[in-house]
Amino acid sequence: MTPHSELYATVLSVFAEEGWACQEVSGREVLRAGFEAHHTRVDLHVQIFPPLAAVSVVSESPVNAPGPAHRERLAELVMRVNQTLTVGNFELDWEAGRLLFRVTNLFPTPQGDAGIIRGLVHTTVGEMDRIAPLEAIVLRSEGAALAALDLAALLNRDDLLPAIPVPDLSPT
């Protein structure tokens, strides 16, 4: 078996330090992991590309769109969400009717950066969890209600997201 790259070793160490359970894919520099987030379970894989010093983290929605009308609305939803993102992007696997979130980083050194790798995993889990309630609304809608969904307004709803704790920045 070929020895693993420095970047793969860094990814493995991040998962170990965080206590994140994962499974290694035999013969490849790929990890699979699952996380219980606020709205949904997020399964992801982390793939290392040593010649590029790149790490790609991809999560996949646990649900499938039942047909073309739902896929069209999900495609519009991810297009609108992607316009708001700085890091990563959503995709729609049309045949499977599944949403994916992908984020990739190229590192200037062969071992990468543990803090950035940790952030890639957090971003992937967070973004898939953030879109889950919106995806559920689209998938529950049928016929005229599906066609009438105002996706722009749906994206502006803040009642679907968990509250973000505000740190106390007062002097101590």
Image (spheres, rainbow, N blue to C red):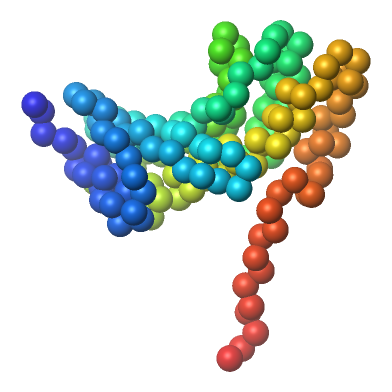
Left or right, 20 with respect to 13, comes to right
Q: Residue at x 40, y 50 (%)?
A: 118
Q: Residue at x 81, y 43 (%)?
A: 156
Q: Residue at x 73, y 16 (%)?
A: 70
Residue 50 in the image: above or below residue 121: above
Q: Classify the position of the C terminus by image quarter.
A: bottom right
Q: Is residue 108 visible?
A: no
Residue 101 percent location from the top left of the image: 54, 31
Q: Is residue 3 visible?
A: yes
Quadrant of res 126: top right
Residue 14 in the image: above or below residue 150: below
Residue nearest the observer in this picture, 21 or 128: 21
Q: Residue at x 66, y 36 (%)?
A: 131
Residue 168 in the image: above or below residue 149: below
Residue 69 in the image: above or below residue 75: above
Quadrant of res 64: top right
Left or right, 146 with respect to 26, comes to right
Residue 145 percent location from the top left of the image: 89, 20
Left or right, 11 with respect to 6, comes to right
Residue 2 percent location from the top left of the image: 10, 28
